Amino acid sequence: MLNINSIVEIIQLMLAPGIMISACGLLLLGMNNKYSLVVNRIRLLNEERRKAVQKTDDNDFKYHENLRLESVSMQITKLVFRVKLVRNAVLFYTVAVALFVLTSISIGLSFLFDLTKLNSLITILFLLGMLCVLCGVIYASYETYKGYEIVNFEVKIDE
């Protein structure tokens, strides 16, 4: 039978992955917000491009309108790449959460059934979760850099 000290120890060990689950949840919240913004921007630019293409049938299509159409097409291409980066970050954060949940469950099972053989598995699960967080952060950082490039491109075109 487990005594109160063992139960407290189990709970403390299970909290570390729990904290990482919360951290990943915050990262996911931010990335999902960014995902929505990028997708909405793609939709707006796509609508603008559709209207501009319809206007090309008219005879009064001007040089600056053609320039804007090219700019919008280029931005859509870059934004589609950017949304893939956000998707990858979200996937890695989600997998990390799953690994941290498995880590917590494994810690509980290890203590409950006195399975010291699970110690290596617990460590591996936690480390894999941390690697997934690192990959997510790398994708998120690269996405931020690409977002800056797109804004820079748009500002230069519109000048």
Image: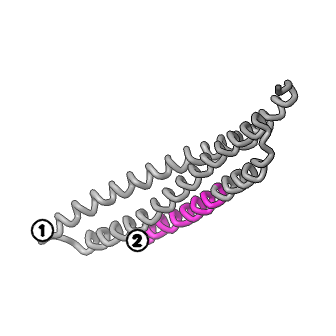
Query: Circle 2 — which element?
Result: helix
Horizontally, is 145 left or right of 62 in the view? right
Label 2 neighbour load within 10 Å: few <14, some 14-19, many 20+: few
Q: Which mark is residue 133?
A: none
User: How many numbered markers are drawn?
Assistant: 2
Q: Indicate which disc residue 157 carries.
A: 2
**Mark 2 or mark 1: whose residue is earlier in sequence:** 1
User: Residue 30 vs residue 17: left or right?
Assistant: left
Q: Position of residue 102 (x, y in %)?
A: 65, 44
Question: What is the quadrant of the N terminus in the image?
Answer: top right
For residue 25: magenta?
Answer: no
Q: Amino acid at mark 2?
A: Ile
- Please, what is the dominant secondary structure of the magenta stretch? helix
Instruction: Report the span colored magenta.
Output: 133-159
Residue 155 falls in which quadrant of the image? bottom left
- State the image coordinates of residue 46 (x, y, percent, origin top left): 30, 60
Q: Which residue is label 1 attached to?
A: 58
Q: Residue at x 57, y 65 (%)?
A: 142
Of the 4 image quadrants, the one containing the C terminus is: bottom left
